[in-house]
Amino acid sequence: MFESYGIRSTDLLWTGRPASGLRFHRNDALYVPFSLMWGGFAIFWETMAVSIGTPWFFKLWGIPFVLAGLYMIAGRFFVDAYRRSQTWYGVTSDSALILRQGWAGKLQRLYLPSINKIDLELAPAGTGTITFGDAPAATWFSGRQNWSGGPDAPSFEGIGEAQRVYDLCVKAQRSSAAAMQPA
């Protein structure tokens, strides 16, 4: 996968993929009720506008809100699953790699010595998410994830052996930083 970007397989210390399929995230405890209220009201509005014969403007006005509600209720889970299905991760001696293929594909290379913070969220089964750096300032509602389900900061999402990969990243971060120090 990474060879087409000039990264040899011998340079990779670890490669992996995020968990596949539909996933719920911690923030869905807030997103799901909000999306149901939004979508429910939008569908109610549109149904009333059509059934009582209001002017065409009111019938059209509700359509974008219904579509946004449907995306928030269900569509975002499928967008997140597709995004993760097109994602590969890698760790080299000095970098964390996030490769996204498909629509808007790109390789993101995170130089580990320049990252001030690496966080690990570990699940009971040993899977987890490693976040590199700080997420942008978040509100009380958005937390660390956006509406598509993905994190706001670069992350290895839902990977197996998360503790081992985290230790590998921290070790690479420290050894690369130490190698850069003047003697």
Image (spheres, helix red, strand yellow):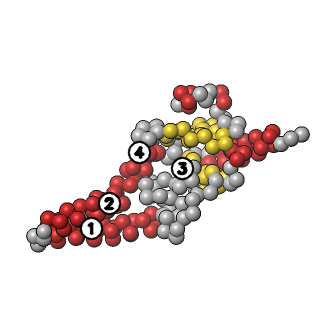
**Res. 158 mark:** 3
Disc 3 to disc 4: CB gap under 8 Å:
no
Q: How many marks?
A: 4
- Lower sequence index among marks 4 and 1: 1
Q: Measure the C-alpha gap from mark 4 to mark 1.
A: 26 Å
Residue most toward the left?
A: 53
- Quote the CA–CA distance across marks 2 and 1: 9 Å
| Three-letter code for the amino acid on which mark 4 is drawn | Tyr
Residue at the location (32% across, 60% down)?
68
Report the front residue among 174 and 135.
135
Is 38 situated above or below 146? below
Instruction: Give whichever of discs 3 and 1 has the lower sequence position.
Output: 1
The residue wearing badge 4 is 82
Give the Cα separation between the discs numbered 4 and 2. 19 Å
Image quadrant assignment for residue 96:
top right
Q: How many residues crowd mark 1 within 10 Å: few (<14), some (14–19), many (20+)?
A: many
Identified at 39% across, 65% down, the residue is: 32
Q: Nearer the viewer, mark 3 or mark 2?
A: 2
Q: Confirm or deny contact between disc 3 and disc 1 (CB under 8 A).
A: no
Q: Earlier in the sequence, mark 3 or mark 2?
A: 2
Q: Amino acid at mark 3?
A: Gly
Determine whether, in the image, residue 53 is placed left or right of residue 6. Answer: left
Q: Which mark is residue 68?
A: 2
- State the image coordinates of residue 35 (x, y, percent, origin top left): 36, 66
Mark 4 is surrounded, within 10 Å at the Cα level, by few (under 14), some (14 to 19) or many (20 or more) other residues, namely some
In the image, residue 82 sits, relative to residue 72, either above or below, namely above
At label 1, which amino acid type do we have?
Ala
Q: Is residue 126 above or below residue 103?
A: below
Question: Which residue is depicted at the point 83% across and 42% down?
Answer: 181
